[in-house]
Amino acid sequence: MKEGKNYINLIHGDLTRATQVRDGMPESIGVMSIKTANRTVLEASLLPTPRVLWDSFWYEGELSCLFADSNVGKSILAVQIADRIARTDNVLYLDFELSDKQFQLRYTGEHGNLYAFPERLYRVSLDCNSLLASDFEVAIIGSIEQMALQTGCKIFIVDNLTYLCCAMEKGDAAGRLMIQLNNLKKRYELSILVLTHTPKRSLDCPITSNDLAGSKRLYNFFDSVFAIGKSAQDNGLRYVKQLKVRYGTYSYDADNVIIYEIEKVDAFLQFVHRGYSTEKEHLKKLGDNESSQRDCLILQLSQSGKSVREIASEVNCGKSTVSRIIQRSKEGRTAAVPSVLPSQPTGSGTTGQDGTGGTTTAAKQAELFAEQEKEEDKP
């Protein structure tokens, strides 16, 4: 029945293509391909459904990102993901972080026993001598393309993007590299997981897309994004959170993160599943004094003319938190010095349910939100 359905869709696809040509609409112009929406859907229906590579975080055919702060366990989790996938598929793990000896020690037990990885897992390291005489960016992208062609491997893990971009020493390196990886993904039907760092962040704030280093240039290139957070309540715990999903389900948001503990089991250093929780339970609880100091710093930076985005970056806090503190301060000043006596009417506006001037209150709120939006829009 399924084969019959595919056959019918093939015929429909040919008919929609013929109709497009008949109507005088070209199939391509320059580097752009043009199809009707119906033809796009019909042709895509003939393609296989992407497989799950790791839970709902990474699917076949996706360019995905895993990010976290230093020493939180990105590489440990990435190798664990590679180990699982390599039981059925060839995986190329591009390791730009550890030396061969460091990698070996990480997967050696107490008594010197070595962990046995699946034979389908291949670790790739840089040949520094060859790189000396080459353009770094051209060499890396060219090598990945050649590996895809010569090995037939479809699954790549790059550890990590931060190293590659630093080595290129160019400001737009990350964005350009992502474009090239995306092109390789589409051309050779690859599945690529890229690891990258996040700037040092405060443990009292939830993980957001703003924590991804170079997020403005990078975030939109990825099909899916997930991150590792360190628990502020227990130093040995980690949590994994989804931030972006294009295929599959958005299962692990702030209300349902996965909790892990890093342990070495039978010489294999890994994330051991410990259940589920909310992200809030693992964030640092600010004391009154610490919270007050942070709020004062935010207000000082705001008064100096810095934007909400700049302040959030400087104090390692979310933009919404910064905006809320600034707005609360403005409301406090307004309440301390009222423009009219509380018993006097405030113009001809309507009265709200609490007996206050509804229209005037709404106007004040609108002014505050307008000021807030202006601050957020500053570069």
Image: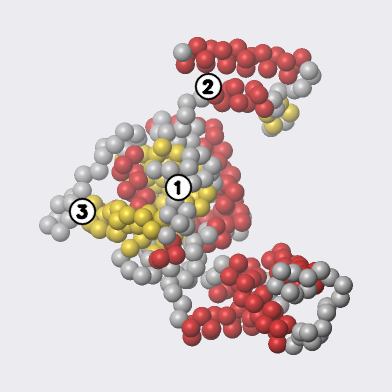
How many marks can you see?
3
User: Could you tell me the amino acid type at mark 2?
Assistant: Leu
Residue underneath mark 2: 46
Q: CA distance from mark 1 to mark 3?
A: 27 Å
- Return the residue nearer the eye: 69 or 44: 44
Which numbered disc, 1 or 3, marks the residue closer to the eye? 1
Q: Earlier in the sequence, mark 1 or mark 2?
A: 2
Assess whether mark 2 and mark 3 are in contact (beta carbons under 8 angstroms).
Answer: no
User: Could you tell me the amino acid type at mark 1?
Assistant: Ser
Placement of the C terminus among the 4 image quadrants: bottom right
In which image quadrant can residue 301 be found?
bottom right
The residue under the point 32% across, 38% down is 86
Residue 99 coordinates in the image, percent (x, y): 32, 56
Horizontal side of 197 relative to 311 (left or right) equals left
The residue under the point 49% across, 64% down is 206
Any part of residue 334 in sight: yes
Q: CA distance from mark 3 to mark 2?
A: 43 Å
Which numbered disc, 1 or 2, marks the residue closer to the eye? 1
User: Could you tell me the amino acid type at mark 3?
Assistant: Val
Element class at badge 1:
loop
Dot 2 alpha-carbon crowd within 10 angstroms: few under 14, some 14 to 19, many 20 or more: some
Residue 103 coordinates in the image, percent (x, y): 29, 54
Assess whether mark 3 and mark 1 are in contact (beta carbons under 8 angstroms).
Answer: no
The vertical placement of 217 against 320, above or below, is above
Element class at badge 2:
loop
Any part of residue 339 in sight: no
Residue 176 coordinates in the image, percent (x, y): 59, 49
